[in-house]
Image (cartoon, rainbow, N blue to C red):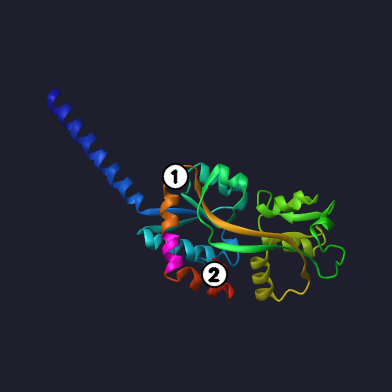
Amino acid sequence: MRRKLFAAAMLAIVAATGLTACSSSSDANVLKVGTEGTYSPFSFQGTDGKITGYDIEVIQAVGDKLGKKVEFVLTPWDAIFAGLESKRFDLVANQVTINDERTNKYALSSPYTTSDGVIVTRADNNAITTLADLKDKTCAQSATSNWGKVATGAGAKVESVEGFVQAIQLLKNGRVDATVNDTLAVAEYTKKTGDTGVKVSGKTGETSKQAFAARKGDAVIADVDRALNELRADGTLAKISDKYFGTDVSK
């Protein structure tokens, strides 16, 4: 009787192990990606409610090259790296600017976007035209973003926001003096809204390159780089870029 029970128990363990293996194999075919979903034109929800944008289409193309299904995990920017570190997802696709701090802490892909930083103020503000003018002023920024660090480095006080749209709202309401962001994001906002209440008052003088981020030592980043190289070579990156910006910002 005991032998029969033991044999039954062993069969149950083998069956359970088999199920676990199948589950792991299935997961291996999925690339989980953390993204904001509120940062147009890079990552946002379309009129149909589906996540879309430049970063979204690029990482989906990467997934196609790797034979993986891409699943998105919507996460606020200031929590996005914590989500990566806690393994809620495999990659961050949200205009992660390459800098020394991130290079040391994460595995970053080759760049898929190159852009410039700009300063945005209310249309009637002529006192801020350079980074130096931000000293002792208040800027609305995502606290952990590269642009937030640019503003802080210029001597500005940072009012934390969840994203660019909220930053513009605070700016227009007079609660902050400026916001620093990517010229592509600002151009998209202006094109979509026709908002004449704000303006680009100056440039930061910095050209930034953006990459996908994975955990340090994760082999997935080598696969992502291989896919990005293929997408550059076959013209896919240029095509996606032209769709959103009218030019190739992937170079």
Q: Nearer the viewer, residue 131 or 21?
A: 131
Q: Which residue is mark 2?
A: 46
Q: Which residues are magenta?
A: 227-233
Judging from the image, what secondary structure is the residue with disc 1 in?
loop
Q: Which of the two discs, 2 and 1, sits closer to the camera? A: 1
Image check: 14 left or right of 162? left
Q: Quadrant of the N terminus?
A: top left
**Horizontal and vertical percent position of residue 237:** 48, 68
Tell me how far mark 2 sits from mark 1, CA to CA. 31 Å
Amino acid type, residue under disc 2 in the picture: Gly
Q: Which amino acid, mark 1?
A: Asp
Which residue is at a point 57% across and 64% down the rendered structure image? 42
Q: Quadrant of residue 236?
A: bottom left
Location of residue 23 with respect to 182 vertically, above or below: above
Q: Residues within 10 Å of mark 1 (few under 14, many from 20)?
A: few
How busy is the neighbourhood of tag 2: few (under 14 within 10 Å), some, or many (20 plus)?
few
